[in-house]
Amino acid sequence: MINMTNPVGPTPLDKPGLVGQPLDRIDGPLKVSGRATYAAEYHDEHPLYGFVVQAAISKGRLDEIDTTAAEKAPGVRLVLTYKNALKQGPRGTSGNPQLEGPSIDHHGQPIALVVADTFEQARAAAYLVKPRYAAEKGEYDMGSSLAKSFVPKSNNGVPADTASGDLTAAFTNAPVKVDVTYTTPPQTHAMMEPHATIAVWNGDSLTLYTANQMLMRGTDMVAGTLQIPKDKVRMVSSYIGGGFGGKLQVEADAILAAMAAKVLQKPVKVVLTRQQIFEITKHRTDTIQRVKLAAGRDGTLTAIGHESWSNNTPGDTFYESAAQATRSFYAAPNRMTAHRLVTLDLPHSSSMRAPGEAVGLLALECAMDELAAALNMDPIELRIKNEPQEDPEKGRPFSTRSFVPCLRKGAELFGWSKRNATPGQVKDGAWLVGMGMSGAIRGNPMLTAKASVTLDKNGIATVRSSMTDIGTGSYTILAQIAADMLSLPMARVRVALGDTAFPAAPGSGGSFGANSAGSAVYDACNVLRGKLLQAANLPPDSTFNNGNVTGLGRTVSLTDLVGPNGLEADGAADPGDSRKAFNQQSYGAHFAEVGVDRDTGEIRLRRMLGVFTAGRILNAKTARSQAIGGMTFGVGAALTEDLVIDKRFGGFVNHDLAEYHVAVHADIPAIDAVFLPELDDHSSAMKSKGIGELGICGAGAAVANAVYNATGVRIRDYPLTLDKVLNGWAAANKTGDAVSQRKAG
Amino acid sequence: MKAFTYERPTTLADAAKAIMAKPNAKFIAGGTNLLDLMKLEVETPTHLVDVNRLPLDKVEDTSDGGLKIGALVRNSDLAADPRVRKNYGVLSRALLAGASGQLRNKATTAGNLLQRTRCYYFYDTTKPCNKREPGSGCSAIGGFNRILAIMGTSDECIATHPSDMAVAMRVLDATLETVSPDGSDRKIPIADLHRLPGKTPNIETNLKPGEMITAVTLPPPPKGVQIYRKVRDRASYAFALVSVAAVVDAEGGMIKQARMAFGGLAHKPWRVEKAEQVLAGAKANAEAFAQAGEDVLAGGQGYGHNDFKFPLVRRTLASVLTTAAHSA
Ligand SMILES: Cc1cc2nc3c(=O)[nH]c(=O)nc-3n(C[C@H](O)[C@H](O)[C@H](O)COP(=O)(O)OP(=O)(O)OC[C@H]3O[C@@H](n4cnc5c(N)ncnc54)[C@H](O)[C@@H]3O)c2cc1C
Ligand code: SF4
């Protein structure tokens, strides 16, 4: 068992090997040739098809729901409503009940499931379900409901509020300060694969082929909801077409499919449409964030305050921990962070890639840029000036902290010295050009995990774990770890993931996947090495090389040691106390150059660079992909993504990817990510840190700061769309130096 | 999606007959708009007449030096046609500024002209919408209307026609050719195809029931510089907030003739004769461009989120005209 209470010390991964190499994803060929089976594709189950009917109001209840016409429609087998739904457990961390009763909490809430022989029949019949509503007035606008905000219960043991020193006094007395409010809109995960489940009952055992990032927690939730023993639930998510947090929980597709399959005693498939995903599943809440920074004239921060408001459906306690990163990022003697939650009658909000940091840094890192401008100081120097030597709130040491090297290396690679600090000065044809930067910080969690590894008589090693691969490269890095630990080539390692029949791992979320499952695989391999040594009768200091083990002057092939049935070993990993003893984060610095059209205000990214440190990099290629993927997400957050709330009706106005704008290829021209070498032996058995979310953290702020540098317009309301640029120019009585000053004719 | 019947005629005569044989029948071409609307039951045809096997997929020279574009010519093919690229650059650019490569491969000339609005509420059957359900109200007025119209709107509807291609065709003075179920054919100037919403936003064009577009003809190439400028929220795969299609004939700092059509402003490609008259014979300078902008926007109305389109039109137009006058 790996326990991270103590540093890992020297390991077999310290010598150069496959770990770290930019290897292609081992599941790539399966995916591009259509042989990777996704949740909705277990066709041999011959499922019936369920289609969800959604509430057309945002608050109130069903007075009546008439299913007669739907039931008579061709091919229909079942119409499930609250009247005939199975009894379910309560809503909470281990319950997501559906069709509980007539009450309606939010627009788009499932109110029925129509099951038919074909998808088309189910969908057609779904429109025949006739609900009658008693609507009530709801509240949909956070800005006008702040008076009703409250202190939420802590998220995962992290308190909602922290404070030290005297923020008010320090702020009042400071010679230079900013007090700014930033707003970020709701966002949706917009992963490629929709939420999808095929539910199959075998007696009292349930198998769910489903798209889910965290299977063990998923079985808890399914069991808790359906009120069945947890060991009767198997979840299979072999391949997942992206999640970004949208598949951390068991959603309506799984629960409804399971209930219908139980009633009908036949497999049932439910796939949500894109339009349904927006309101049935969770989204990232909008936030209002107030940041106060105070500094001496030399740029030394004396006070940092960060308050954040977010919202959720009645009874849902998740809040966006936007100020959490502020607790670790910069030194200052007087500090305050606070989170407040507002209850609104909107769809449920929850985690989306880097919950907390992703939107928190959009505010903090722009406020830092504003402070740098007020100080007439380079924003990189401002950050270096306030580099803490230890956790600024708790006084714990950092496990490792290489933020300053990221800043310096990034500045050098990006050509930061060429930036003109005075906004609105650099022109290139029709464009105003600006550069901006931002810091990146992301917590480095780890959870308990298990894995097993077998080595068969043909020398093939097979790793098993209920870890998931949501497109990140889990299959590949786990194979690399096992290959190095057992001194095998990649071609002799198989990895089987995404099945709760395998040893329990938490899955993919919060950037803990590689730390947790990787350490368990490492441990399993270590145990297997022990067994091999025992079989070979060799001492622990023997060396593994090329599928052999050498010691005492003897070299033995591993295949000769495993016997006819092969050898198996179980591994486990536990975070221990290292995260209490050390403040653990991964770091980075983003640099962006944008062009802003002088006539139209259109903002286009021109180039972007991220420089990161996250302990040992397990695969240079998948790590870079994660980083540039996160940065791309950040560009979307800065410039385009906006899930618009209809403040009269509740619910969201834009329902599809034509009108919810994620960044497309043309928006991301030259983008690169660089990882600086680092080892963190308090983090994981591999001395690596989580990287799945680091890339998004701060990325959007670098873009926003570049827009300010280009235009002189500071937009504090994300996303930064051209209308806001035009308004900014109009307010400042500037024209963007556009048409009126350009010579015509 | 409601169940429907389907047929795929191979002659115009059969297609014309088929469309009237069943009530509530519709033509389907690329299906890139119609199918989306059917899935949401915004459109509920009972019968589809697939026009894809009709011999309408050619681009041909006309005797007067123009082009005749078959109704089924795909947006990608039309944009890539060498004659279009050489002589009607504004059209090629407008097409390529629209949608995505995959959609353009499917989308047809007629389907593009007849695509329906992207008003969010039109697609959301839980909300009132006069276009979808006459008399139910307009959710966009007082709601989120950032992408919607500022010109030619009514109290009943502020939807825009979202096409890029149609804006270019409008500036080129294209003409539609149609056949009706009774076999008669007629020509319709593109200016007369789309209607303003008025009291009947559900009636979007002046086509008669069952009337099929067979071709679009372009007059001989106009003189002057051709520009298509699309202003949008991301670099690709976004509908126009505002677009300008311009053909400007200028020389020595003087504009001889300027033709301008606008997308993203109205229920149809927007073109204002007065603005063109003002520019004809005018000096190419900021004052003239500003005046043209005022004339284009005369009588317009903003609805809050889309107020920015007024300055945006002025600025974009001035930019386009400046570029055109410079490159002439
Ligand atoms: C995500 C997305 C983004 C898009 N972005 C853009 C964009 O940026 N710019 C842009 O301009 N467009 C855009 N489009 C719209 C696209 O251009 C249209 O969907 C397409 O042009 C429609 O052509 P179609 O052949 O597929 O039409 P269909 O969907 O087949 O038909 C559309 C309508 O035309 C009717 N019809 C078709 N052919 C005939 C005929 N011969 N005679 C009479 N009636 C006929 C049909 O009955 C139907 O009502 C986008 C679409 C999508 C889905
Ligand atoms: S603008 Fe037109 S299409 Fe949009 S909601 Fe109003 S009536 Fe419907």
Image: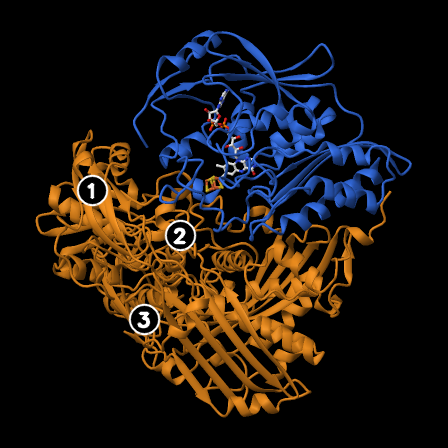
Chain colours: A orange, B blue
Three-letter amino acid code at the position of disc 3: Leu
Q: What distance separates the C-alpha of mark 1 from that of mark 3?
A: 33 Å
Residue sticking out furthest to the left: A203
Q: What distance separates the C-alpha of mark 2 from that of mark 3?
A: 21 Å
Q: Which residue is mark 2?
A: A242
Residue drawn at the location 54% of the way across and 81% of the way down? A330
Q: Is residue B138 above or below residue A297?
A: above
Q: Which residue is mark 3?
A: A447
Three-letter amino acid code at the position of disc 1: Val
The C terminus of chain B - image quarter: top right
Q: Is residue A420 left or right of residue A477?
A: right
Question: Mark number for residue A268?
Answer: 1
Q: Along the polypeptide, which appears first: circle 2 or circle 3?
A: 2
- Dots 2 and 3: beta carbons under 8 Å? no
Protein chain holding label 3: A
| Residue B68 percent coordinates (x, y) | 64, 16
Mark 1 lies on a secondary structure that is strand
Q: Along the polypeptide, which appears first: circle 1 or circle 3?
A: 1
Three-letter amino acid code at the position of disc 2: Gly
Residue drawn at the location 70% of the way across and 60% of the way down? A729
| Residue B20 percent coordinates (x, y) | 40, 13
Which marked residue is nearer to the observer: mark 2 or mark 3?
2
Q: Residues within 10 Å of mark 3 (few under 14, many from 20)?
A: some
